[in-house]
Image (tube, grey):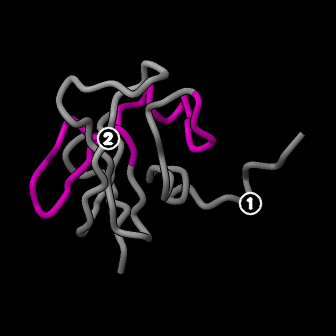
Amino acid sequence: MTDTSAIPPAATDVPADHLSVNPRSPHFDEAQLRRGVGIRFKGRERTDIEEYSISEGWVRVQAGKTMDRKGQPLTLKLTGPVEAWFQDLGEDAPVAKKD
C-alpha cells in the first residue's frame, strides 16, 4: 500500500507530462483520460490531440482519415508550446506547462 499523504495535492491536479489516447501506448492512462484533459497548443485549445509531451513541446494529431497497414490512424507530430489541465476542475484548474 502506498502513502498518498506524502504527495502534495497540487501534484495530482495536473495531467501527466506525456499522455496518449491509444491503449497500445505505454503513455496511456485511462484514469487521467476519464477526468478529461484539456490541451492548449500554440495558444489555441485543441480537441483532436492523440498524444502530447509537455516537456518535449509536441503533439500528435490524426492525419485525416488515413490509416496505416495495421489499421491505426496515421499521425503528424507538431512542435510548439503545450499546456494541459484537467477539465473536471473547472476554469481555474492548475495548468501543466513547460517553464
The structure residue drawn at horizontal position 14% and vertical position 63%, both measured from the top left corner, is 42
Quadrant of res 68: top left
The stretch drawn in magenta includes residue 33: yes
Q: How many marks?
A: 2
Q: Is residue 78 above or below residue 75?
A: below
Residue found farthest to the front: 69
User: On the rendered structure, is 93 left or right of 72?
Assistant: left
Q: Secondary structure at mark 2?
A: strand
The quadrant of the rendering that contains the N terminus is top right
* Badge 1 amino acid: Ala
Of 66 and 11, nearer the camera is: 66
Residue 18 percent location from the top left of the image: 49, 54
**Left/right of residue 66 with respect to residue 4 in the rendered view:** left
Pointer 2: residues within 10 angstroms few (<14), some, or many (20+)?
A: some
Q: Which residue is mark 1?
A: 6
Q: Which residues are magenta?
A: 24-51
Q: Nearer the viewer, residue 11 or 52?
A: 52
**The disc label shown at residue 75, or none:** 2
Residue at 33% across, 35% down: 74
Name the residue at the left extreme: 44
Q: Residue at x 17, y 30 (%)?
A: 64
For residue 35, side relative to residue 62 (left or right): right
Number of residues whose C-alpha sits closer than 10 Å to that of mark 1, classed few (under 14), some (14–19) or many (20 or more): few
The disc placed on residue 94 is none
Residues at marks 1 and 2, CA–CA distance in whole angstroms = 38 Å
Tag 1 secondary structure: helix
Q: Position of residue 85 (x, y in %)?
A: 33, 49
Q: Is residue 78 above or below residue 21?
A: below
| In magenta stretch: residue 23 | no
**In the image, residue 40 lies at what x, y percent?**
20, 54
Q: Three-letter amino acid code at disc 2?
A: Thr
